[in-house]
Image (cartoon, rainbow, N blue to C red):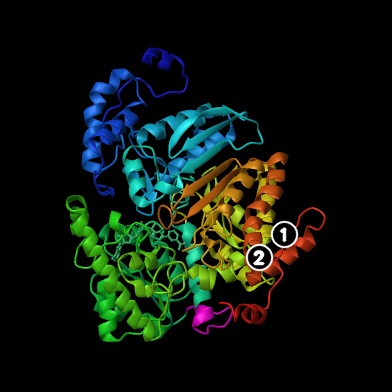
Amino acid sequence: MVTNLEIAGAMTVKLDPALPEMPDFMPGIRRAPDRGFRLTRAQAKIALKNALRYVPESLHEELAPEFLNELLTRGRIYAYRYRPPGRIYAKPIDQYKSKCIAGKAFQVMIDNNLDFEVALYPYELVTYGETGSVCQNWLQYRLIKKYLEALTEEQTLVVMSGHPLGLFPSRPEAPRVIITNGLMVGLYDNQDDWEIAAQMGVASYGQMTAGGWMYIGPQGIVHGTFNTLLNAGRLKLQIPAGGDLEGRLFVSSGLGGMSGAQAKAVEIAGGVGVIAEVDGSRIQTRLNQGWVSRATADPAEAFRLAGEALQQKKPLSIAYHGNVVDLLEYIVSRELRVDLLSDQTSCHAPYDGGYCPQGLTFAERTRLLAEDRAAFRKLVDRSLRRHFELIKILVDRGSYFFDYGNSFMKAVFDAGVKEISKNGRDEKDGFIWPSYVEDIMGPELFDYGYGPFRWVCLSGKPEDLAKTDRAAMSCIDPDRRSQDRDNYIWVRDAQKHDLVVGSQARILYQDAAGRVRIALKFNEMVRRGEIGPVMIGRDHHDVSGTDSPFRETANIKDGSNVMADMAAQCYAGNAARGMNLVALHNGGGVGIGKAVNGGFGLVLDGSGRVDETIKSALLWDVTCGVARRAWARNENSLSTGIEFNSEYEGTGQITLPYLVKDELIDTVTGPLL
Ligand SMILES: NC(=O)c1ccc[n+]([C@@H]2O[C@H](COP(=O)([O-])OP(=O)(O)OC[C@H]3O[C@@H](n4cnc5c(N)ncnc54)[C@H](O)[C@@H]3O)[C@@H](O)[C@H]2O)c1
């Protein structure tokens, strides 16, 4: 029988044998709700053993009851005691220890994801999206940091659902870190089984950039929301190309991690927004950051302010402190005109607290969630049904409603509204209203390869960010396409809009060629010593990397929207081409079993090797998705594919589909089907 002494002796990288002091919880920091203990006795025993296997036997007696208490009262073992005391934030890269630059860089990224200013529930390691976590608990956090400190150019750290499996010999060209989160065997790939696995300490919900360590605060989504709103206006409100949302009203909900971008984005797009939010603390955060301009708990006041701004054609964002369903009741009863309508509550996890039902305050929601989940579920369903009815009325009156990637329509369907599905039976044919990807982002951006490219100046210096902004601008030709003009204006004005929360980061939608050009330019600047090292990456919400039929791949119409081949290929291809970090997750954005998504990280260190990685890996990362979209006969990606084949003739080629005439298919199938 192997002894604990032998086990301790067999590891050099391990947690210290000393018991850390229990840290104080800072008042005013948002805390995750109790996730509801639901393990059997046998499972709970395994969960305890699972948590205790990170620490030496000498600590087991003391920690076992403490961990059990966490499991029973919070529905998870977070091992709070192991949270390092004080503030966690993205420090300048040279303040971190490691044997390689990527090892330091990933510590910057992880710490940014856990910053009180950035993260949704920092004590519970949740970065955004109600449940999106860096890893499961503070034991894993500490161990991951130790491994990153020890990491060399000849090793790869493997992280499975937050658990650092170990350091494995590899090569400098291989990824330094490979992450997977929440991947489940098909039979168990559902929320209920995942919940049990999470409580047992073997599954983590990485969302996208939370568990992929690439979150850059709500700025990450402002650019996407800005693009979506602008293009929605141009497509549906007859605003000419180049025009903005002046004099137009947008109504939505959510001022949380990602949804917090809506208010800022509508102002940048020149429009007026009223955004409902039930949690006062999140409104306060956005007010403090200047991401929302006004706040009121009185709908009449909200619409008085909105009306004035609309009349004066001035941009304005207003937070309505209350439930979005109540806000819509007010709009419907007063017959107010709404141009663009959406929702960004965390409907990917409505029964876990992501959606606050009508009739409950935020505090009541948290209490009921802990006390009676079945009753909570009933209220959520009732509220979603009413929410649906109100949107239907507004759509009939001329509002353009779009699902904004939070699985809202799926949640309404699951609440019993079959009418929201196109075939009135199941979700296979989609829903009656478009998702923003179907109507806007898919055809206008993804099909051309435009997606949320991002970078972080690891020196932590605002001057470096300003230099990279200018350099990125010089790589864009604003006269090429309207998308390029929007992107050029975005990065030109980015500093003015004061978008940085946490690390010195920028998001900039770019196509494949643009991303390569910009990354090469930055790497050259690092080489010349003009700026410190830069981390490049992207949101998983992109052209490729993510198979998500209710979101990113909602405009894939050849039947392959139920497949996850693209996400897996993108991830493997990025690893093969030398990205420093590759991540693959279950469920990001829409919930377990509903998506597979992946992303990457690459540290620009000024080296020639990184130049080569940029040229092959960044190109692959985007083109994989364009090729798949082209094969699905998406018109704009067909033209992007033709351009690619001409540019890369002899070195690369996308298989393009021959187009089949509908009349022929109708004639052939007519007598038989
Ligand atoms: N479209 C995109 O590009 C995109 C990107 C990221 C995330 N998302 C999705 O958007 C959703 C929100 O993400 P997030 O990170 O902001 O999550 P979050 O949980 O931080 O924020 C959601 C907010 O909605 C509020 N809320 C819940 N129910 C409400 C109600 N009935 N009325 C008013 N406010 C209510 C919550 O208090 C919370 O602040 C998630 O489902 C996420 O997956 C979409």
Residue type at mark 2? Ala
The image shows residue 632, relative to residue 150, as above or below, that is: below
Q: Which residue is mark 1?
A: 654
* Most foreground residue, 424 or 168: 424
What x and y, as percent, mark residue 148?
51, 31
Q: Which residues are magenta?
A: 233-245
In the displayed image of the protein, which residue is found farthest to the front? Answer: 672
Q: Is residue 569 visible to the viewer in this orientation of the structure?
A: yes
Q: Is residue 76 left or right of residue 338?
A: left
Most common secondary structure along the magenta stretch: loop
The image shows residue 373, relative to residue 638, as above or below, that is: above
Q: Which residue is mark 2?
A: 630
- For the C terminus, the quadrant is bottom right
Which quadrant does ligand 1 occupy? bottom left
Q: CA distance from mark 1 to mark 2?
A: 9 Å
Q: Secondary structure at mark 2?
A: helix
* Residue 243 magenta-highlighted: yes
Residue type at mark 1? Ile
Disc on the earlier residue, 1 or 2: 2
Q: Is residue 529 visible to the viewer in this orientation of the structure?
A: no
Report the number of discs.
2
Q: Is mark 2 within 8 Å of ligand 1?
A: no
Q: Is residue 636 left or right of residue 329?
A: right
* Most foreground residue, 302 or 341: 341
What x and y, as percent, mark residue 664?
67, 80
Judge the density around disc 2: few (<14), some (14-19), many (≥20) Cα neighbours within 10 Å: many
* Most foreground residue, 1 or 108: 1
Q: Residue at x 58, y 71 (%)?
A: 443
* Residue 454 magenta-highlighted: no
Q: Is residue 570 left or right of residue 314?
A: right
- For the N terminus, the quadrant is top left
What x and y, as percent, mark residue 386?
27, 73
